[in-house]
Amino acid sequence: MVVLLLLVTVMLVRTAAFRVNESVAGPPPEVTVRAGFAERLAGAIRLPTISYEDADLFDGDAFTALHDHLAEHFPGVHSTMTREVVGDFSLLYTWSGTDPSLDPILLMGHLDVVPVEPGTEQLWTHPPFSGVIADGHIWGRGSLDDKPSVLGTLEAVEALIAQGFRPARTLHLSYGHDEEVGGAAGAAAIAALLQSRGVRLAMVLDEGGVIGDSLLPGLTRPTALIGVAEKGHVSVELVARATGGHSSMPPPSTAVGRVSAAVARLESSQMPVRLDGVALQMFENIGPALPLAQRAVFANLWLTRPLVLRQLQGAPSSNAMIRTTTAATIFEGGSKANILPGRARAVLNFRILPGDSAAGVLAHVHRVVNDPTVEIRLAEDEWEPSPISPVDAAGYRTIERTIRQLVPGAIVTPYLVLGATDARHFSGLSDNIYRFLPIRMNSDDLERMHGTDERVAVDDYEQAIRFYILLVRALLI
């Protein structure tokens, strides 16, 4: 009884001390957003700057038209900043600061969008490239991913130039044209260009986390997720071969059966879960804002960690935060019902948690498959997890303060980006790389990003422009 009483007391004390960071940044300075901002974004959405896996489908004219749209509607930027076209269709702008001893800042976005899934066009409320402004929203592919980053940062710089602002620190704006297919010709080329010039960046800001509404059951406060790292990825191919023949005389195990068994073993014996690093930081920041029972659980992870890990594994989004994930994405084998295939193939995509590695994934696959008749090899080049950027650096603190100025009461927390962004190409140029799009979203909005009825609220986009104005002004002085 004494031990139980002590245990309960410790848990209650820790829960009481587990509180949200309520630091107040004060009211934001006066910020004026240029009239017509929504129509300028809508005009960019009307240009179908689509990245396809099949490079033959690429339409360079759409990207050139977007370049012209930006030049027309942001005259101050184009008369003040140096503009370079990189890789034929990506853009790099430079606003030279008055103090060359200060390392530059880089703000990023990407010009390209994903295709609309064939056959779903009729499901859209407004055609996907119509750029309609209706019902308080700007509709169309790219309205969330990622033209608000591009147009929003340009709106901010245009406004500051009009005010006569002179930056002490140099600012670069980087807009890649192929982020949705890896960024090799766009952001990677821009990063290589800057590196060849000996540029060292004080901070990089790309898309990534957002301001989430109702991200977890019981979480009622808006939550700003600042990506401080992103997962890596590697795809592994499994191949089994057989003699083939007629299905009336099958062997005990076919090529399809062996590859299927290997995939099943990998799905049932996944890589271990871990609640540490960025994921732990995030739950330590969010936990105090949860209802009492959940708050007590996260306040006492020394005791409740196994329970929390089991719960987090129950949903795909939270499971991805705590382990290197396994996803079987391709399966091939056979051409006719009565013919034994001579070859079967599967591809599994692994998203690598910081602390794990591509080599570790490959070793895991060999150990779990444990079948010498199944060939195992990399299906594509691997990409290791990014370094974790510090949360005590000036850049992170400036982003955090700007969020608190515009969204009083928001929880601000580090976040692990589950997908890949163009920011990873700049890891050799800066230790301070952050991923954050200052748009409010709920779970429905997140599903729209690569899906049907992508849209952004006009008010939310205006708030994003205010964020960029305040951030740029704070970073460049």
Image (cartoon, rainbow, N blue to C red):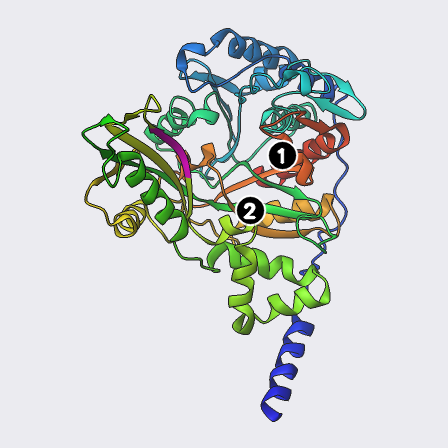
Report which quarter residue 130 is drawn in: top right
Q: Residue furthest front?
A: 248
> Magenta segment, which residues?
328-332
Residue 398: image location, x then y, percent: 60, 46
Q: Residue furthest bottom?
A: 2
Note whether residue 38 is visible.
Answer: yes
Q: Main secondary structure of the magenta part?
A: strand
Type of amino acid under label 1:
Glu
Residue 277: image location, x then y, percent: 47, 57
439 relative to 81, above or below: below
375 relative to 60, above or below: below
Q: Residue at x 25, y 48 (%)?
A: 366
Q: Which residue is mark 2?
A: 317
Question: In the figure, is residue 130 to the left or right of 349?
Answer: right
Q: Which residue is mark 1?
A: 447
| 329 drawn magenta | yes
The numbered disc on residue 282 is none
Q: Residues within 10 Å of mark 1 (few under 14, many from 20)?
A: few
Residue 410: image location, x then y, percent: 71, 50
Looking at the image, tell me whether mark 1 or mark 2 is earlier in sequence order: 2
Task: Name the residue nearer the viewer: 244 or 259.
Answer: 244
333 relative to 476, above or below: above
Question: In the figure, is residue 239 to the left or right of 78?
Answer: left
Q: Quadrant of the N terminus?
A: bottom right
Type of amino acid under label 2:
Ser
Note whether residue 354 is visible.
Answer: no
Residue 415: image location, x then y, percent: 54, 49
